[in-house]
Image (spheres, rainbow, N blue to C red):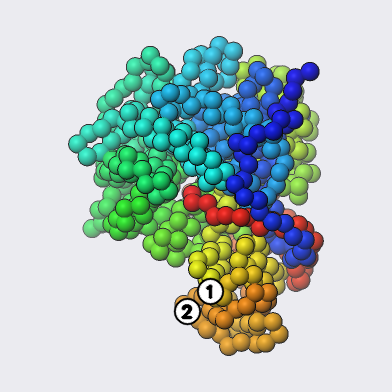
């Protein structure tokens, strides 16, 4: 009998220090740590340990085309998106403290580490026995290199294992050698030996590369140069910030100088009169590619304190946040889009380039969670495949099919690819779950005895726990542990004049610093209660990119959508359960074991 990896013991994925758990009764409102537990369940349940699949994760789950629902593979899986899952797993473990499927996760990580070549790059073991990877020889998927770099940076911090540092430095060197260096900038070759969508940026040991400089942003996989390579300099800049690697910083700067060339921006053929849009990060095209590139430019700008680049990114973010139904974080169809914006908004805010906490609050309370499959969706999910034909009738069944075993249950925690929630992709599930992390991370920060509460969400931390009654009640309780001072950001919709606060049972006068309430002289075990009237309002929003153009009424309680006049798309279950869920004016309570994460990760 084969020994399953879950029976084995491995240190590759163990936290450098344990967090702590405690039993509490808390308001049963949005809890990102609980959402992270779902995500962790999904990812570790889609790792296939059967030897012929080598711990590859499912790329997609189709709940609606065949009965029973199935999961399958794709060329962009192991080489491109699985490294994103690897990064997400470190974040989700940190948030939730879950120990589910640790052994299986370790086996998957060992497989991925074994794919690192002598040149430091991540080589997908393509072979005739793995037809779903399409290339029958080992290959480097360009897009996945930057994702693997980010994943290794996360696990280096999470485990404290110096082995990761060596792997990261070797990959930086490998990327440096792969890049085409010009006078002051660099880019990665855009075409390898396999000229097919998604395979174009894959390099093999002996295959030729097209070294010519890309002339347009609209080249590369999915019609976007940025999608293919725009995110790379961000991981490099982060590694410089963590390790001081001058090689990583130099390469990051060379790539940023290439990516910020005016020819790649405002390339849609018209512009406001008297505005040179390429200087202001105006763009049109691949949403993920542009948002990821903006974040990478920001990470370089932070590492080098380049104020002009910081403002460039700020303008690019503000441009992006006008798309579709940005008010609730619905920028485009995929379940990863909102999360990418959450990451950018948190980074901009943390770096003091802007204050986008109100945006993050709106995103994470709405589209940033709504695309995730949760146990509430089970009936809907079961209904999707009723009466559909078997998967064996699918044309590419023998290539991409992985399994139809327990697919619905294993899909809980994934993020949908479209608002109809018919299917999920590892692309959307990874970024969707990382969006939970970005918001969770940014919700509460600590330095030198001072806590800043940026988002009024349930959140445990070593310094202070937050119990949020929103959006049922206008009430937040801070349970102090070690802080002597706290700044609490109050959302825009709250009437500041009606806010009441007390420490223990003693009312205290308000001390406002802009949108923050200040509490000083705090002692351990102090309980701070902040209360204000809830506000319900209905807003009308026109969404120009939808066909047909839609006028929609959106009812909010605070920043939470509680009712939509029309679904996001016909048949979409998004937000449909909310009128019932938020009927009560009192927050339900629940008992749970809260996990306190032991450290902060730089991402
Ligand atoms: Zn996606």
Q: Which of 239 and 488 is in front in this view?
A: 239
Q: In this view, does 333 lie to the left or right of 45?
A: left
Cα distance between the residues tagged 1 and 2: 8 Å
Q: Position of residue 556 (x, y in %)?
A: 62, 66
Residue at the top extreme of this rendering: 128
Residue shown at 28%/35% (left/top)?
186
Q: Are marks 1 and 2 in contact (CB under 8 Å)?
A: yes
Q: In which quarter of the image is residue 204?
A: top left
Q: Is mark 2 on a helix, strand or loop?
A: strand
Q: Can you tell which mark lies on residue 583?
A: none
Q: Where is residue 3 in the image (x, y as percent from the top left)?
A: 74, 23
Residue behind mark 1: 487
Mark 1: C-beta under 8 Å from nearest atom of ligand 1: no
Image quadrant where one finds the N terminus: top right
In this rendering, is residue 381 above or below 60?
A: below
Is the residue marked by circle 2 packed among few (<14), some (14-19), or many (20+) residues within 10 Å? Answer: few
Q: What element carries label 1?
A: strand
Residue shown at 57%/37% (left/top)?
86
Whether residue 35 is visible, yes or no, is no
Q: Where is residue 403 in the image (x, y as percent from the top left)?
A: 71, 25
Residue behind mark 2: 513
Q: In this view, does 450 lie to the left or right of 578?
A: left
Is the residue marked by circle 1 packed among few (<14), some (14-19), or many (20+) residues within 10 Å? Answer: many
Q: Where is residue 316 in the image (x, y as percent from the top left)?
A: 37, 53
Mark 2: C-beta under 8 Å from nearest atom of ligand 1: no
């Amino acid at each position: 009998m084969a020994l399953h990896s879950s029976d084995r013991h491995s240190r590759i994925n163990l936290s450098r220090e344990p967090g702590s758990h405690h039993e509490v009764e808390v308001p049963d409102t949005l809890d990102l740590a609980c959402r992270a537990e779902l995500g962790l369940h999904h990812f570790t349940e889609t790792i296939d340990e059967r030897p012929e699949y080598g711990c590859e994760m499912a790329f997609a789950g189709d709940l609606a085309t065949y009965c029973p629902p199935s999961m399958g593979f794709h060329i962009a899986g192991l080489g491109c998106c699985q490294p994103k899952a690897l990064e997400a797993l470190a974040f989700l473990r940190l948030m939730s403290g879950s120990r589910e499927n640790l052994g299986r996760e370790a086996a998957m990580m060992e497989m991925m580490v074994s794919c690192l070549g002598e040149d430091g790059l991540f080589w997908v073991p393509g072979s005739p026995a793995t037809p779903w990877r399409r290339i029958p020889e080992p290959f480097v998927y360009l897009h996945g290199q930057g994702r693997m770099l980010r994943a290794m940076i996360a696990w280096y911090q999470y485990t404290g294992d110096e082995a990761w540092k060596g792997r990261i430095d070797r990959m930086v060197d490998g990327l440096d050698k792969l890049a085409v260096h010009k006078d002051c900038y660099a880019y990665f070759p855009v075409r390898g030996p396999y000229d097919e969508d998604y395979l174009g940026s894959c390099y093999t040991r002996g295959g030729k590369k097209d070294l010519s400089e890309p002339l347009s942003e609209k080249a590369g996989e999915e019609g976007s140069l940025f999608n293919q390579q725009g995110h790379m300099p961000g991981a490099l800049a982060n590694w410089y910030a963590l390790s001081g690697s001058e090689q990583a910083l130099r390469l990051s700067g060379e790539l940023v100088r290439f990516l910020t060339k005016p020819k790649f921006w405002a390339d849609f053929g018209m512009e406001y009169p008297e505005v040179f849009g390429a200087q202001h990060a105006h763009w049109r095209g691949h949403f993920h590619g542009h948002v990821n590139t903006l974040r990478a430019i920001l990470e370089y700008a932070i590492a080098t304190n380049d104020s002009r680049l910081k403002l460039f990114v700020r303008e690019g973010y503000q441009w992006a946040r006008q798309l579709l139904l940005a008010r609730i974080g619905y920028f485009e169809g995929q379940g990863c889009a909102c999360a990418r914006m959450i990451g950018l908004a948190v980074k901009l805010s943390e770096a003091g380039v802007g204050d986008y906490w109100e945006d993050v609050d709106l995103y994470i309370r709405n589209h940033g969670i709504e695309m995730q499959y949760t146990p509430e969706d089970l009936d809907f999910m079961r209904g999707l495949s009723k009466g559909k034909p078997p998967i064996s009738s699918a044309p590419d069944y023998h290539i991409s099919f992985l399994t139809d075993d327990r697919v619905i249950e294993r899909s809980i925690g994934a993020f949908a690819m479209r608002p109809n929630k018919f299917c999920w992709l590892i692309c959307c599930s990874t970024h969707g779950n990382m969006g939970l992390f970005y918001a969770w991370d940014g919700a509460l920060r600590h330095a030198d005895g001072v806590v800043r509460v940026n988002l009024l969400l349930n959140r445990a931390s070593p310094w202070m726990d937050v119990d949020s009654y929103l959006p049922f009640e206008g009430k937040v309780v801070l349970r102090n542990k070690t802080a002597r001072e706290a700044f609490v950001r109050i959302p825009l919709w709250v009437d500041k004049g009606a806010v009441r606060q007390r420490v223990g049972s003693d009312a205290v006068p308000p001390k406002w610093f802009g949108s923050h309430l200040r509490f000083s002289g705090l002692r351990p075990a102090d309980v701070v209660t902040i209360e204000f009237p809830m506000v319900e309002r209905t807003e009308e929003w026109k969404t120009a990119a939808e066909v047909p153009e839609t006028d929609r009424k959106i009812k909010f309680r605070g920043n939470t959508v509680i009712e939509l006049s029309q679904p996001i798309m016909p048949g979409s279950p998004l937000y449909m359960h909310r009128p019932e869920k938020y009927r009560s004016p009192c927050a339900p309570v629940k008992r749970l074991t809260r996990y306190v994460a032991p450290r902060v990760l730089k991402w």
